[in-house]
Image (spheres, rainbow, N blue to C red):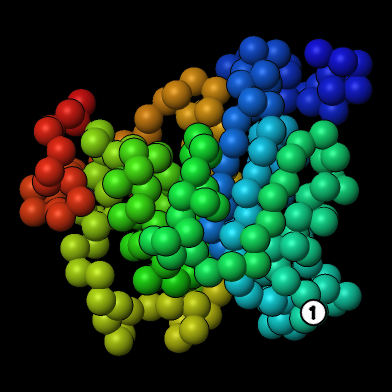
Amino acid sequence: MSGQIFERYQKQLLFRPIGSKGQQCLNKSRIGILGVGALGSNLASICARSGIGKIVLVDSDRVELSNLQRQMLFDEADIGCSKAICAADKLSRINSEITIEAFCERLDARNFRDLFGGCDLLLDGTDSFVSRFMLNQQAIESGMPWIHSAVTAASGQSLFIMPRKTACLRCLIPDTDEPADFPTVHNSGIIAPIVTIIASISAATALRYLVEKHIDYNLKYYDAWEHRFSSFAVSRNDSCPHCRSFKQEQK
Ligand SMILES: [Zn+2]
């Protein structure tokens, strides 16, 4: 490990579960992030600073003034720019020793492998019901682990999904049609603290998985207004169309 790399990750290296061996694991790891808005820009910032070797960013949106309240990588000069490309530029200035690829595209079943093939882990930074279920289906079919994150109003949740082992998003939410009264950022708003809290919970889960291959079976829920935290196991649903074809391998 060169002197500059040692200096950059000095405090992370002192954290024993990571150390120099774990740091090398992180440097060799490749992750994909779908959505580089509120959750995604926080996830990307933590992953880049932690030294994850390759980060693939996918987002077709552009930065708007109303994003700046919670999308931590962007500022007023970025309004109108591609979120993925602008985030990649900021991240490369935070850590020039890692590889960052940015795609201003909408993820679908046809480009999933082109964009995210070869990644060790995928992170959910989207706020779209449809995109999230598409990511779930593609990740399960490709055998790729991913971490679901979602935030609305003052609360949010994080769930690690390992195909063939843990419950998937469809096990948790069987109906893929978004109900009209389902709370979303568009009808219930969002405060910035819950974004950084849930992104941090998911990023910590990601670091531990990449370093130790630790599989976390619990859904973590946090309400930042009431300061209420809960964590509980989610069971695989026998009628889930994605999981039912797999032989039961749950712990
Ligand atoms: Zn499932």
From the viewer's side, name the closer residue of 32 and 203: 32
Work out whether 34 lies above or below 180.
Answer: above
Circle 1 packing at 10 Å, graded few (<14), some (14-19), many (20+), is some
Q: Quadrant of residue 215?
A: top left
Q: Is residue 247 left or right of residue 61?
A: left
From the viewer's side, name the closer residue of 115 and 123: 115
Q: Is residue 99 left or right of residue 223?
A: right
Farthest right residue? 3
Farthest left residue? 239
| Total numbered badges shown on the rendered structure | 1
Q: Is residue 59 left or right of residue 13?
A: left
Rendered location of residue 162, percent (x, y): 33, 38
For the point 42% across and 52% down, which residue is it? 148
The answer to whether one can see residue 29 in this image is yes
Q: Quadrant of residue 216?
A: top left
Rendered location of residue 231, percent (x, y): 35, 44
For the point 54% across and 52% down, which residue is it? 115
Rendered location of residue 201, percent (x, y): 52, 45
Work out whether 211 lies above or below 65.
Answer: above
The quadrant of the image that shows the N terminus is top right
Residue behind label 1 places its C-beta within 8 angstroms of ligand 1: no
For the point 75% across and 62% down, which residue is it? 85
Label 1, secondary structure: give it.
loop
For the point 8% across and 54% down, which residue is it? 239
Residue, disc 1: 79
Going by the numbered disc 1, the residue's amino acid type is Ile
The quadrant of the image that shows the C terminus is top left
Q: Quadrant of residue 97?
A: top right
Rendered location of residue 199, percent (x, y): 57, 52
